[in-house]
Image (spheres, rainbow, N blue to C red):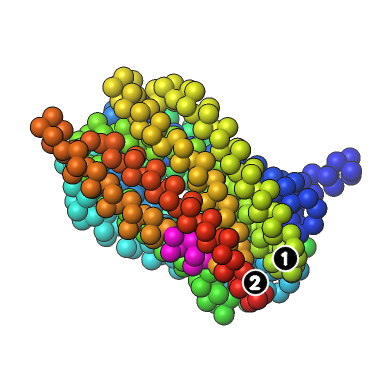
Amino acid sequence: MSSFSSTLKQFFSPKDMSVGSPAVRIAEFAIPMLIGNIAQQLYNTVDTIVVGKYVGDGAIAAVGGAAPVLNLMLALMIGLSTGVGILVSQYFGARDREMLSTTIGNCITLTALGSAIIMAIGTVITTPLLKALDTPEGDIFRWSRDYLLVCFIGIVGTFYYNILSGVLRGMGDSISALGFLLISASLNIVLDLLFVAVFGLEVFGVALATVISQAISAICCYIKMLHMREVFDIKLKYFKLTAVAKETLRLGVPSGLTQAIFSFAMLAVQRLTNSFGDAVMAANVVVMRVDGFAMMPNFSFGQAMTMYTGQNVGAKKYDRLKSGTIQGTVMAVSVSAFFLGLILLFGHQLMGLFTDTEALIEMSFGMMCILAAGYVAMGVTQSLAGVMRGAGDTMTPMWISLFTTVILRVPLAYLLAALTKTDVLPMGDYRCIPISLLVSWIVGMLVHVAAFLSGRWKKHLLDY
């Protein structure tokens, strides 16, 4: 019995990624994270399915139209999570208990401050921002506003789950974060059906279910951390902001800005999408929900590469970076291609989960087919960007994202729309939206490969 208990404890303990086979260590981390990311994607997906089935296609458009606004406000969380993850992985790899404890304590304080700021700003700008995006008046506008207000008011749970699960992953423990997320995702499904199908709360209900579920995930992560005293300490003295907070922001702000830039670009494209009407809006939301699952392998292996690189940099085992990069990228591309094959094979059935409208299903599947090749390209992009971030170079991926999303994708989408305007299509061809995204992904991959091969990111290794 003691042997089983010991094995179970080791399974849910931090993992040292600076020893052993790189492929095995990356897979041990990435696979639970992949499952966890899929579960987290279920939050928005189930929201969309429930409102689509019980409220209507207009509600699908409302939930999807609100997403770019919410993502913009969550940019700060992305930055903090990235910065904390990098420092935690490096201090854990270096076995520096004091700095690890300080980093974790500082991140808890920064998260509280960030939550208060986003809650205040988000609730104020929701209505004027939706108007600026030309969100259709009536039910769609009301539903979008309700969804955003609930999410912003309950933002503290979302913030803390993402930050604290990032801390656990930084120490190589992606299993615990997965377990908590699976519990939360299951609860979210139950609450979605209860609030919408039973109580008739419409879009307000799915937002409330998401907020409650993520808050429970955050509480579970914190309880887990309280039982990890063999690795670090949680004491009040570590909650006082120090130079570590500044270093966290230095590493995290570029990632946060990258997310903000991406969200601004999405807002600009969302305005174009809205101009095509309710049907295209709803189809785009369905595609983005399926897209979330197609992207999961890329994001999971990208995060795994960041943690792998960070731990090996902390342990000063630089010789493991090359082999880890090659093996991690190959796995990312292979898993992504497998997922993509499933999505294309069962595409019509997947789209049918969201709506019973046949024209909407066909439109969504056509857009998904256009994006197909881009997912493999993103596997390379995310892996190489993860290595650069783990080594401390968060600026290069930021500049590349700035170029591909703002300078390339947004103007290209509007240009293609303008070039395809006809008497039959007065606003242009809606397929300009996925085509512009595909082009930006492929160009982004090429630029990331060039930046990685240049080796300039390695100069950041000298800082550790």
Q: Quadrant of the C terminus?
A: bottom right
Residue type at the position of mark 2: Leu
The quadrant holding residue 227 is bottom right
Say which residue label 2 marks: 461
Q: Which residues are magenta?
A: 394-400
- Circle 1 — which element? loop
Q: Position of residue 237 (x, y in %)?
A: 63, 77
Residue type at the position of mark 1: Tyr
Q: Quadrant of the N terminus?
A: top right
Does the magenta stretch mainly form a helix, a strand or a loop? helix
The quadrant holding residue 427 is top left
Question: Which comes sooner in the sequence, label 1 or label 2?
Answer: 1
Rendered view: 182 above or below 234: above
Q: Nearer the viewer, residue 105 or 90?
A: 90
- From this viewpoint, is residue 64 visible? no
Q: 81 left or right of 120?
A: right
Mark 1 to mark 2 CA distance (whole Å): 9 Å
Residue drawn at the location 69% of the way across and 58% of the way down: 322
Q: Position of residue 93 (x, y in %)?
A: 73, 65
Q: Position of residue 175 (x, y in %)?
A: 68, 46
Q: 122 left or right of 222?
A: left
Q: Nearer the viewer, residue 76 or 347?
A: 347
- Report the disc number at residue 318: 1
Q: 156 left or right of 5?
A: left
- From this viewpoint, is residue 379 visible? yes
285 magenta-colored: no
